Image (cartoon, helix red, strand yellow):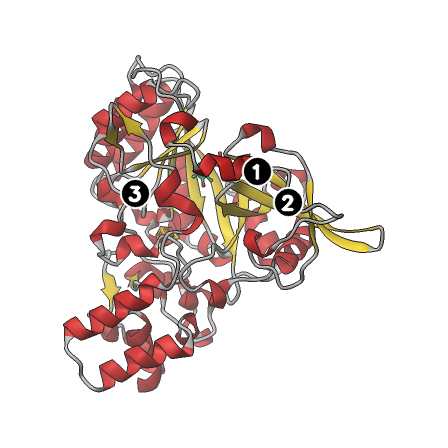
Amino acid sequence: MEYKAYTIHNFRSIPQLSILSEQELFEIEVVSQILPFKTNSYVVDELIKWDNVPEDPLFILTFPQRGMLIPEHFDIIATLLKNKADKKEISKAANEIRMQLNPHPAGQLELNVPQVSGDKLTGVQHKYLETVLFFPSQGQTCHAYCTFCFRWPQFTGIDSLKFASKETELLVKYLKSQPKASNILFTGGDPLVMSAKLLGSYIEPMLQDDLPHLETIRIGTKALSYWPYKFFADKDSEDLLEIFSKVGKSGKHLSIMAHFNHPRELKTRAVKKAIAAIRSTGAEIRTQSPILRHINDDPKLWISMWKKQVNLGCIPYYMFVARDTGAQHYFNVSLDEAVDTFRKAYSKVSGVCRTVRGPSMSAAPGKVQIIGTIDMNEEKLFLLQFLQARNPEWVNKPFFAKYNPDAVWLNDLEPALGEDKFFWEDEYNSLYDLKHEELYPNIED
Ligand SMILES: *Cc1c(COP(=O)(O)O)cnc(C)c1O
Ligand code: SF4
């Protein structure tokens, strides 16, 4: 199959879309002025069930939905388009609306960007001691865009909002200065939009003898869902697999952090072949997904997803809660529903699927798991814990919050049992006053 991208500029040429009304097509156009829209020939021809459209979860996964914008924002853009406003005017209005959608959740800009010898490493985030996140500048796009994506500002072309780096050299220097960083996580966008050659130029420097403390290389990707041909049918597929093998041969572990949202993504011949190809290099595939209204808010889907993943040789890893950005109001489920769905699914799979953890919020202080709800002294409570935290000492220490059936994110929660703050709050607030170097002293400087 040939990769063909569809965006706002050519999506009307997708033959299957003839089942939509002109109004429905117009709505796609309106929403995609604000939130990025891209899908492709594989998603359209092999994933979406067109006789279910417009409710089909895989349709909703990449095609913008009217409900993703609040009516006020929708109307502003719809009016401009109907009046044939000029491009500049539309993009000005679109930018103003984007700024109201919390483009950088979880303090990503202020807190996590490290420095090396006084230079800011703008393509790097270092939040948890053992894992450095790297955003290779040429992996800041994806084979298709998920409508719910919290990284949406990266795709909208507002340059100052981009994290990016060409500077592998600086990255290596930084990694050398961080002996506790045992993991590097290549992320994006999707690093596997890059050619094998380009990817190799980022990965190979990580395999040098002088980074012995770097044990694991991870690549976060949705290519298995959006372009599985990448791994066995593209012209440089073999080179890509060769790079994967090289990591293993160098004595490091390669983990593909694959993003799957729905069991149907695991059913095509292409994805099965791709998974087998990756596994043949010695790499492991770990899987993660947020829980999303309209897409996978049903325990049956998670049971099916985790079982299929394990059968294909993948390791279920995280269930996330949708982040507080972009179209969260359209996709989010309450924390209460998330933990209930997780429990219903988790309780019906065997231990081999129970490597999965969640539901988890990637919030500013860390990844917070909702363990469950309990009744204590006639008060209903949420029980929570950190799976990852800015301070490793916070991890795995259960804490309580008042039960709130409407809460969708950490900042909707309040301390319980007469406490006026969470145990980590004072320290977290004091971290805001620390510069990154103080959080992660750079031993070379
Ligand atoms: C999730 C995440 C990681 C990786 O966490 P693991 O629990 O080790 O998978 C690293 N850095 C940031 C900023 C993250 O959000
Ligand atoms: S593949 Fe990942 S980064 Fe790309 S749009 Fe989907 S969620 Fe966002």
Foreground mark, 2 or 3, reads 2
User: Looking at the picture, which amino acid does disc 1 mark?
Assistant: Asp
Q: Which residue is mark 3?
A: 192
Q: Earlier in the sequence, mark 3 or mark 1?
A: 3
Q: Is residue 10 visible?
A: no
Is 234 left or right of 309, judged from the image as shown? left
Taking the spot 69% from the left edge, 54% from the top edge, the residue there is 344
Label 2 to label 3: alpha-carbon separation: 42 Å
Around disc 1, counting alpha carbons within 10 Å, would you say few (fewer than 14), some (14 to 19), or many (20 or more)?
Answer: few
Q: Which mark is residue 426?
A: 1
CB-based contact (under 8 Å), mark 1 and mark 2: yes
Q: Which mark is residue 9?
A: none
Q: Earlier in the sequence, mark 2 or mark 3?
A: 3
Position in image of residue 76 (x %, y %):
31, 79
Foreground mark, 3 or 1, reads 1
Q: Earlier in the sequence, mark 1 or mark 2?
A: 2
Residue 315 vertical position relative to residue 40 in the rendered view, above or below = above
Secondary structure at numbered mark 3: helix
Between 362 and 402, the residue placed more toward the observer is 402
Taking the spot 50% from the left edge, 53% from the top edge, the residue there is 290
Secondary structure at numbered mark 1: helix
Label 3 to label 1: alpha-carbon separation: 40 Å
Between 165 and 11, the residue placed more toward the observer is 165
Between 60 and 388, the residue placed more toward the observer is 388
